C-alpha cells in the first residue's frame, strides 16, 4: 500500500557523539514507520557512552551507531536537516534547495555533566536532553505521505 518512499531526516550537531545520535535513535523509534533517520557532526567525537546508556533506559539501542561527519554521508539527499546545536547551525554545510533546514538548540550534556559529582548526576543531564529531544521530534513538521498527496510533503 505504501509505495511512497520514506522521508529522509538528518540530525546534525557538532561532534555527532550525543545529541544528534540520541535524536537519530529517537526519531527511528518514534517515526520510523515513515522516516529514515540519520545523524552526523561537523567533526566526529566518537559515540558518547552515557548517551547510549540513557537511551537503553527507554528501550532504544544506539550502541551500534558510530560517529560520522556530514562529508561521510553527503551522497544522500535529505528532505530535512535538523540542527540540534547552534554551532552546527552556524557552520551548517550547504544543502540543496529542496532540503528544509530546521534549527532548535539543545543543551550539551557532556558540557553540563563535566562538573557532576556522581555518575547519577551526570546522567540526569543526558536524560533531560533526551526527553527534550523526544518531545521536539514528535512536533517536527514531517507528515506521512498519504496516497492523496501523491508524494508531496507539503
Image (tube, helix red, strand yellow):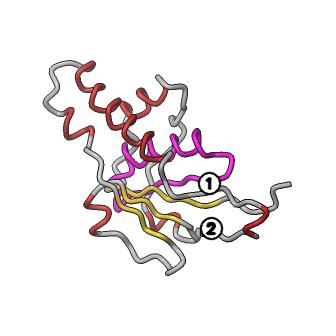
Q: Is residue 149 above or below residue 10?
A: below
Mark 1 lies on residue: 36
Mark 2 lies on residue: 153
Residue 85 horizontal/vertical position (percent): 30, 55
Which residue of the protein is positioned furthest toward the bottom in this rendering?
Answer: 97
Q: Nearer the viewer, residue 25 or 99?
A: 99
Callout 1 crowding tier (Cα within 10 Å): few <14, some 14–19, many ≥20: some
Label 1 to label 2: alpha-carbon separation: 14 Å
Residue 140 horizontal/vertical position (percent): 49, 54
In the rendered structure, which segment of residues is drawn in magenta? 15-43
Image quarter for residue 75?
A: bottom right
Residue 77 horizontal/vertical position (percent): 58, 71
Q: Which circle's residue, 1 or 2, is located before the other in the chain?
A: 1
Q: Nearer the viewer, mark 1 or mark 2?
A: 2
Quadrant including the N terminus: bottom right
Taking the spot 54% from the left edge, 38% from the top edge, the residue there is 64
Query: Is 40 contained in the magenta span?
Result: yes
Q: Nearer the viewer, residue 127 or 132?
A: 132
Q: Which dot marks residue 12? A: none
Residue 95 left/right relative to 31: left
In the structure shown, which secondary structural element does the residue marked by tag 1 occupy? strand
Image quarter for residue 88?
A: bottom left
Image quarter for residue 145?
A: bottom right
Quadrant including the C terminus: bottom right
Amino acid at each position: 500500500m505504501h509505495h511512497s518512499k520514506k522521508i529522509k531526516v538528518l540530525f546534525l550537531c557538532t561532534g555527532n557523539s550525543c545529541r544528534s545520535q540520541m535524536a537519530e535513535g529517537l526519531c527511528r523509534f518514534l517515526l520510523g514507520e515513515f522516516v529514515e533517520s540519520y545523524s552526523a557532526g561537523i567533526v566526529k567525537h566518537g559515540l558518547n557512552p552515557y548517551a547510549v546508556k540513557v537511551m537503553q533506559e527507554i528501550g532504544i539501542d544506539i550502541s551500534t551507531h558510530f560517529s560520522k561527519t556530514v562529508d561521510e554521508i553527503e551522497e544522500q539527499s535529505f528532505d530535512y536537516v535538523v540542527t540540534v546545536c547552534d554551532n552546527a547551525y552556524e557552520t551548517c554545510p550547504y544543502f540543496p534547495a529542496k532540503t528544509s533546514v530546521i534549527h532548535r538548540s539543545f543543551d550539551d550534556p557532556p558540557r553540563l555533566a563535566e562538573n557532576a559529582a556522581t555518575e547519577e548526576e551526570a546522567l540526569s543531564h543526558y536524560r533531560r536532553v533526551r526527553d527534550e529531544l523526544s518531545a521536539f521530534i514528535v512536533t517536527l513538521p514531517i507528515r506521512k505521505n498519504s496516497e492523496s498527496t501523491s508524494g508531496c510533503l507539503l
